[in-house]
Amino acid sequence: MTRRFLPLLLVLLTLAGCATRPQEHDSSAPPDTEAVFPVTIGSLTIQRQPTRIVSLSPSATETLFAVGAGKQVVAVDSTSDYPAQAPHTKLAALSPDPEAIAAYHPDLVVVSADTNGLSSALAKIGAQTLVMPDAKTLDDAYREFADLGTATGHRAEGESLSRQVRADVDGIIASTPKPAKPLSYYYELDQTYYSATSATFLGQILQRFGLTNIADGTDPSASGGYPQLSPERILQSDPDLVFLADSKCCGQNAQSVAARPGWNTLSAVQHGRVFTLDDDIASRWSPRIVELVRAVSTAVSQAATR
């Protein structure tokens, strides 16, 4: 999800230490030796274990490899850049082309939304479409880990991954030092000051640390949870912390923020509390949310001890 697609993504979404990585997941559950089918996920019944999967969702791609279904994946979309061994293609996730997808002869296509009747078009070539919608909460993400495991014949691995990520996230949050007073933060999606409120998946994660989001205003659900703030509002709010989710795409960092007109007066700048995040991890609901939670924990810990 690059920032040049942000306006479209906002509409569609109305939208590091010892980090846990998908291919490094140490499952305590043994692999399924005999996957039991058919299985039903939502309204979709999958009759046989899929052997040719196309993923058009970066979050789903990461999860498929994490549950052990990587060898079944024959193609992923152009924005699915993790893990490195994923079969990267030019397939578009936001405007999927049924003919281009059909060239990979899939039996299962995983998407975040059934765009422009994609499932009906793919049904004509014998492919089923599994919709894994944008996670609204952490519980949604955990459920999707388990569902993708079940859908691909890796039920035990999916359920184990769900439990492990939940335990990791809860453990990191519980062990994070609590500041003497509540801290406020500004979360930056791009250099035009789009942000994410507490009504979003991301905002709910940060809220668990007891942080106050300056983007919430009187209605966190306004603008689909992704409002565009003004520089004046940010300066007036004087956040204690600044999180930059535009570091990889746009080269933003503590130095570039301090150089903005008037921003050197912000408490976050003056106290060294401007933190860069990995843009990709921060925009996905994959098992790597553990890395995001750990990054936020580090920031809160530093603020609590200064």
Image (spheres, rainbow, N blue to C red):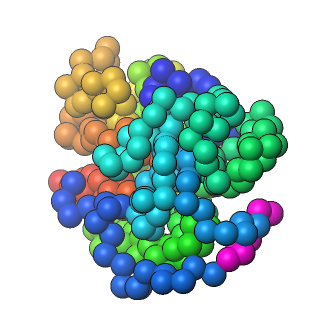
- Residue at screen point 41% across, 38% down: 88
Where is residue 61? Give x, y as percent.
48, 51
- Residue at screen point 29% across, 26% down: 252
Does the magenta portion include 185? no
Which of the pair 288/115 is nearer the observer? 115
Q: What span is colored magenta in the figure? A: 37-44
Quadrant assignment, res 259 = top left
- Residue at screen point 64% across, 54% down: 108
Q: Locate the C terminus and report the quarter of the image it occupies.
A: bottom left
Which of the pair 136/228 is nearer the observer? 136
Q: Say if residue 200 shows up in the picture.
A: no
Where is residue 299? Give x, y as percent.
27, 52
Quadrant assignment, res 238 = top left
Tell whether 119 sits left or right of 91.
right
Where is residue 133? Give x, y as percent.
66, 51
Total number of numbered discs in the rendering: 0
Where is residue 219? Give x, y as percent.
68, 42
- Residue at screen point 20% across, 64% down: 18
Which of the pair 140/263 is nearer the observer? 140
Determine whether 123 is above or below 301 in the image: above
Quadrant assignment, res 276 = top left
Determine whether 184 is above or below 65 in the image: above
Q: Say if residue 248 shows up in the picture.
A: yes
Determine whether 176 is above or below 56 in the image: below
